[in-house]
Image: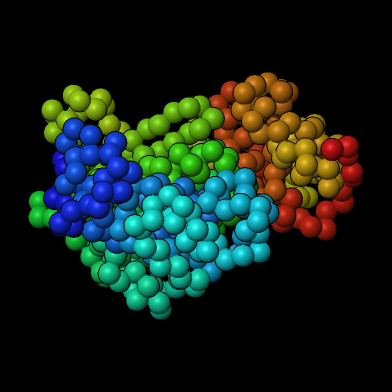
Amino acid sequence: MPLPPLVEPVDALDADERVRTARHSALSGFGEVAQRRLAAAHVAVVGAGGLGSPTVLALAAAGIGALTVIDADGVEASNLQRQVMHRVADVGRPKVDSAVRVAADLSPRTVVHAIRARLTRENARDLLSGAHVVVDGTDTFETRDAVAAACEDLGVPLVWGVVQEFHAQATVFWSSPPAGTAPVRLSDLYPPETVGDVPTCEQVGVLGPLCLQVGAILATETVKLLTGVGEPLLGRVLVIDALRGRTDEVLLQGAAAPTTAETATRGPVPEPTAVPTHPLPTHPDPIAHLDLDAALAAQAGGATLLDVREPHETAAGVLAGVTQVPLAALLADPALAGPGPVVVVCKVGVRAERAARALRAAGIEASVLAGGMDAWDAAPRVTVDA
């Protein structure tokens, strides 16, 4: 159900802004009043990277009155594949400076408060105070937890997303929603005891265009909350599998179940559950994780040692006698692994786990090298052609 708008509209838009946002004003159910609400809104975006970049672009273009953009880092060349707010000329400069530039280019009426700082539990409340909505585009769970705790303390909605490899999630958390709406918190999705050690995008990679897709979703959720238009993702997690071109919806534990009429409109909804960062095919038995000695012993006993890293990674060296099949190719055709048994190897273990589950789903016995190649720096390697 739609929620009440978070902000009162400004009295009027100036002539230039009415022209610039005319396509919003023409939207049925949105109109100039919703656009004037956007002009009155203050949104804080934490992180100016893969998710923060497209979110800032979309919100500035939408006509948000004030944006606070928080990021401590400078632009690196490797950011440009997905962090579309930055340009080659920005390398070495603060990421928040890009937000100031692009907002001025897109929406001269949008005021950007650029804060070059690392958000922590100690400063989060002060940095986020005054925002109507907070968008979390960060990439470590420690920071996500600090953002969520501050939003719960302030009572403001948190628009949240995460992207790794070819997978993504997006949702809305709100500890103090309007009466009649159940509160939903980050801990409902990720109880603290289940988080574990989350790999970084540097370790496992991320598909650049998927960041744009999720950033657009985060911006849309923000607009919906500010204007009261549409049904926000409060109590629902949008789960995206870019490789299969598939988007699913999962209810969170504790969220109210949809009515019969809503189910008829949306279609069947999965049972309420917390979903992992990387939705994987399920299997009744856990995947075995072998140390290096056990993996080499399995290889000596006839198992295939299968390296699913990309060619630019294996060019730096592989374990002797491995079969090399990049993950995407293996997922498309598990038979490339051979009849099994298979011990799967990757950089840190995340891709290997996914590959092993896909192999087991295809009837091939599979296990994983625990910790991936990064856990065995001293292991003897042979070089291969890139």
- On the image, the x and y values in percent for residue 145 come to 40, 64
Q: Nearer the viewer, residue 352 or 203?
A: 203
The quarter of the image holding the N terminus is top left
Can residue 103 be seen here? The reply is yes
| Colour logic | rainbow
**Which of the image's four quarters has the C terminus?**
top right
Tell me which residue sits at (61%, 52%) in the image.
87
Which residue does the image show at 26% across and 45% down from the upper left? 18
Image height of 57 relative to 145, above or below = above
Residue 276 visible here: no
Residue 90 appears in which quarter of the rendering? Answer: bottom right
Side of 73 where 318 appears, left or right: right
Q: Residue furthest bottom?
A: 122
Residue at 32% across / 38% down in the picture? 250
Image x and y of residue 378, in percent: 83, 58
**Residue 350: x %, y % from top left:** 60, 45
Rendering coords of residue 282 (x, y %): 47, 34
Q: Is residue 366 above or below residue 120?
A: above
Query: Looking at the image, which is closer to me, 105 or 159?
Result: 105
Seen as rendered, the residue at the extreme left is: 179
